[in-house]
């Protein structure tokens, strides 16, 4: 009996040790799984943070690109506007010169006509006759008034 008792005692102690080791192992596994869960959560958070940084950097690059393109367009529009204004000024100057030339030509034509009229008056052409008649009529009107 003593042998049976000893056998049962050792079997119980062995079984108890096995159960204790199993429980301890389960606790460690839970701690490790909790640590792994935490580390996985930290990894996810870090990945999300990195993604957010990358997206923010991309937005900033896009904003800088759009700003640069806008500046180039503004510069192009300004230069085109300046060229347009220069062209308009050149056209205005050309038109003004053309008008001045036209006025000079018309003035010279008027002068040549008036010279030809004065020459025709001196030569006794009809213009001179009309002026002589007008002068004679005026003299008659003055004589009649007196």
Image (cartoon, grey):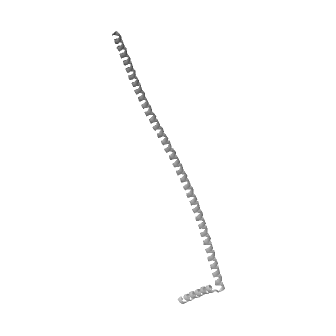
Image coordinates of residue 77 in percent, x first then y, are 54, 56
Q: Classify 45 as above or below 62.
A: above
Q: Is residue 110 above or below residue 85?
A: below
**Image quadrant occupied by the C terminus:** bottom right
Vertical order, 16 against 134 (above or below): above
In the image, farthest residue toward the top: 2
99 lies left or right of 58: right
Q: Quadrant of the N terminus?
A: top left
Q: Nearer the viewer, residue 30 or 120?
A: 30
Residue name at image x 63 percent, y 79 percent = 113
Going by the picture, which residue comes out furthest to the left?
1
Residue visible at 50% across and 42% down? 57
Q: Nearer the viewer, residue 22 or 47?
A: 22
Say which of 141 and 101 sits in front: 101
Q: Residue at x 59, y 64 (%)?
A: 91
Residue 28 location, x and y as percent?
41, 25
Query: Measured from the top left, where is residue 51 in percent x and y?
Result: 47, 39
When asked about the image quadrant of residue 136, the answer is bottom right
- Decide which of 80, 3 is in the foreground and name it: 3
Residue at 61%, 69% in the rendered image:
98
Q: Position of residue 86 (x, y in %)?
A: 58, 60
- Would residue 3 be found to the left or right of residue 93 on screen? left
């Amino acid at each position: 009996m003593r042998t049976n008792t000893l056998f049962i005692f050792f079997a119980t102690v062995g079984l108890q040790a096995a159960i204790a080791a199993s429980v301890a192992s389960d606790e460690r596994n839970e701690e490790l799984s909790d640590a792994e869960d935490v580390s996985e959560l930290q990894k996810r958070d870090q990945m999300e943070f990195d993604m957010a940084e990358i997206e923010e950097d991309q937005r900033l690059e896009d904003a800088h690109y759009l700003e640069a393109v806008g500046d180039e367009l503004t510069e192009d529009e300004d230069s085109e506007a300046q060229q347009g204004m220069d062209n308009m000024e050149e056209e205005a100057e050309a038109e003004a010169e053309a008008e001045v030339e036209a006025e000079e030509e018309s003035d010279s034509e008027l002068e040549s006509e008036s010279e030809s009229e004065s020459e025709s008056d001196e030569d006794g052409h009809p213009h001179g006759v009309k002026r002589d008649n007008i002068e004679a009529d005026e003299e008659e009107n003055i004589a009649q008034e007196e």
